[in-house]
Image (tube, rainbow, N blue to C red):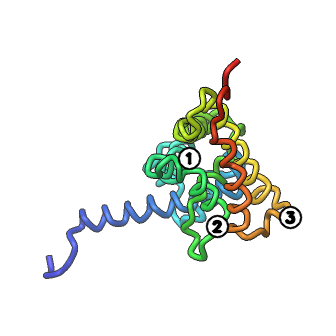
Amino acid sequence: MEPGSVPPSEERRRDASATRRRLLEAARDLFAERGYEGTTVRSIAALAGVNQALLFRYFGSKRGLLTEVVALGGLEQVRATPPEELFETALRSMLTRSAEGTEDRSLEVYLRSVGRGDEAAGTLRELGEEYQSALAGLSGAPDGALRADLAMAWLLGIGLMRTVVAREPLAGAEPDEVCRLVLGTLGHLWAAEPGDGEV
């Protein structure tokens, strides 16, 4: 082997890692644009510029690929973000698009894929449960889980109207303005008052 050259096994590992990353990025973008059911293995492979057999080699199935896409985005985000910052972080990541296309699109994937096939349901339900669990303790009220679900419904509704339906003026609104209006109102939902949640 020539000095400074890379051993063949290391080169293969590097190629495999780059291929996996391209497949994940292609799947993330297509799931966000078309939903789980509307995305084919062939289209993911074509966008990634690889043979579709490699998708099955690295991920086992389209569902396996969805699991990793969601895990790399939403589940990582919810586990790494303090609960008091989670709603704003998720809202901003959904509202803001980077020029490089590296933004977290897990909520878009969720919105376009939820309820569209049993294969995706388990992973997407897990993402919803993780968000609910993280948000439920923010109010300190006995009905914290209900308040968390209401917050999630609002977040997903905003995402649906902005990214899927593309309804104006929300679709073109500045992220800072949307956050100002939403977060100001959301504070009331977390504020537990005496007797809240009691029957």
The residue carrying pointer 2 sits among few (fewer than 14), some (14 to 19) or many (20 or more) residues within 10 Å by Cα, namely some
SS under mark 3: loop
Picture residue at 60% right of the left edge, 65% below the top: 47
Picture residue at 33% right of the left edge, 66% below the top: 14
Identity of the residue furthest to the front in this view:
194
Using the image, tell me which numbered label, if any, was put on residue 168.
Answer: 3
Asked whether the beta carbons under mark 1 and mark 3 sit within 8 Å of each other, the answer is: no
Task: Name the residue beneath numbered marker 1.
Answer: 66
SS under mark 1: helix
Label 1 sits on what residue type?
Leu
Front-most of residues 148 and 157: 148
- The reply, left or right, for residue 25 in relation to residue 80 is right
Task: Name the residue beneath numbered marker 2.
Answer: 96
Label 2 sits on what residue type?
Thr
- The reply, left or right, for residue 148 in relation to residue 75 is right
Task: Answer whether residue 56 is visible to the viewer in this image.
Answer: no
